Amino acid sequence: VRFPEGYEMSEVEKVEAHVRKVQLEYEKDKLMDMIEHTVEAFDEAVRTLRQERFKLDADLKMTDLRMLVLLQELRLLKEFEKRDNSLVKKLDDKREEKSEIVVKIADCRDKSAARKLEIDKLNPKQVLAELVQLVPETNKFHEQLLKIFKKKIKRQKKKAANEGDEEEEGSEEEDDDDDEDMSDLDEEEEEEE
């Protein structure tokens, strides 16, 4: 309440003014406390929100990094898939080649076995008779061809590392058999003369 100038307050008015002043100061202190409390709560809420934002930013960055890593892995996997497909194709081709080679080897073995049987069936006497029939004694090359025919041929076979000794013995026996066959022919010719 405003009083005109020069107005003096009575004792009761002074007491009332003092009481009113104390009430106002009390209310002012209460409001100030409430404002401080509200500001502190607001600051705390802002701090909490800021921390949550930092966490979210960190999570977003980590998610971006994971996405990049996954993208790189996807690219690598696509490259590996291409390589795998080409390697699978090569493997299939090589398997086909192997099966063809196995078939050819089996065919060659069959032919070799048939040829060996055919050779085993041949009698050296018959072969000599055929030679004499094809190249008569009157032919000027008869003696040279007969020498070549009777010549002892030692054939060397390819030896595997683990079958080395066995094959050497086998080849020596075969050579001995050939020598005996040729020596039989020589003896028969000498008897005929």
Image (tube, rainbow, N blue to C red):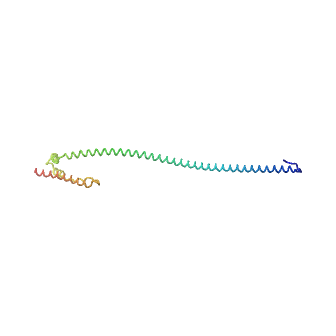
User: Toward the viewer: 45 or 110?
Assistant: 45
Q: How many marks?
A: 0
Left or right, residue 153 beside residue 86: left
User: Toward the viewer: 176 or 15?
Assistant: 15
Residue 191 position, x and y percent, is 10, 51
User: Toward the viewer: 31 or 20?
Assistant: 20
Left or right, residue 16 beside residue 188: right
Residue 37 position, x and y percent, is 70, 50
Left or right, residue 12 beside residue 184: right
Report the residue that reaches farthest toward the right: 6
Residue 182 position, x and y percent, is 17, 51
Residue 90 position, x and y percent, is 39, 46
